[in-house]
Image (cartoon, rainbow, N blue to C red):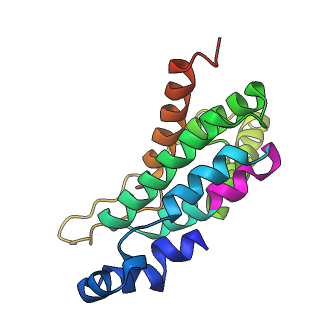
Amino acid sequence: VCKIDLFGLTAEEKEIIGVVKNVSEAKSIKSFDIFHILAEYITESCLLDLILPLKEVLVKTHSHKTIHKIVECLRNISLGLADNTYIPMEKMLIFLYGIISESIPALMSEKECKKLAKEEAKVLEFRQKQDCFIIPPEPKSRMGIKAAAKTTKNANVHVMVEFGLKLYHILLKREKVT
C-alpha cells in the first residue's frame, strides 16, 4: 500500500497542483510514518519483506525525485529499526552487514546471482587447469562508434549501503552496540 502511495498512480495524482490544493489528504504523505511504525514493530523474519519493495523501485528508477523518496523511506525505516525491541542486536548487526556488503541473495538481482555462480564455476575450472601461457584476446576499441550512455542497475546501490551505514551510526549513537 505504501509503495503504491509513494511510487504508483496515487503519487502521480498527488503531484498535480490542483489536487493538493483541493484535497486535504493529498497535502501530507503518511507512508513515511507507516514505514517508521512497521520498522519499529517488525520481526526478524520480515525484515526483507520491508526492504525488498523499495529495492525493486530503486533498481528500476533513475529519477532524482523517486530516489529522494526512497532515501526518505529508508531514513524512517532506520529510525524505526533503531527503536525495535523485537529483533536481537546480533541479528540486526548480521542484517546490517549483509546490506552494507551487498551479500544478501534476496537483494541481489537474478543476473548477479547467476554471475556469482558462473564466477565460482570459472574459479573451480581455472584451478583444475593451470595454463599460464594462454594470451588473452586483444581489447576491442570503439573508435568512431558513438555509444549511448549506459545506466546500470547498480547505479543506485549506494542508497542501500548508505541506509545500512546510517542505521549502524544511529545504533552506535544510542549506545545499543557495544
**Residue visible at 35% across and 73% down?**
27
Residue 64 spot, x, y in % from top left: 30, 63
**Residue visible at 49% across and 26% down?**
169
Q: Quadrant where the C terminus lies?
A: top right
Instruction: Give the prevailing secondary structure in the magenta stretch.
Output: helix
Q: Quadrant where the N terminus lies?
A: bottom right
**Residue visible at 44% across and 48% down?**
159
**In front here: 97 or 126?**
97
Residue 103 spot, x, y in % from top left: 66, 41
Q: How many marks?
A: 0
Residue 85 spot, x, y in % from top left: 74, 33
**In front here: 31 or 120?**
31
The answer to whether residue 46 is magenta is yes
The answer to whether residue 49 is magenta is yes
Say if 78 sits above or below 56 in the image. above
**In front here: 73 or 164?**
73
In the image, is 65 to the left or to the right of 167? left
Say if 136 sits above or below 145 in the image. above
Q: Which residues are magenta?
A: 44-52
In the image, is 127 to the left or to the right of 58? right
**Residue visible at 51% across and 75% down?**
5
Q: Is residue 15 visible?
A: yes
**In front here: 60 or 81?**
81
In the image, is 91 to the left or to the right of 79? right
Residue 134 spot, x, y in % from top left: 57, 41
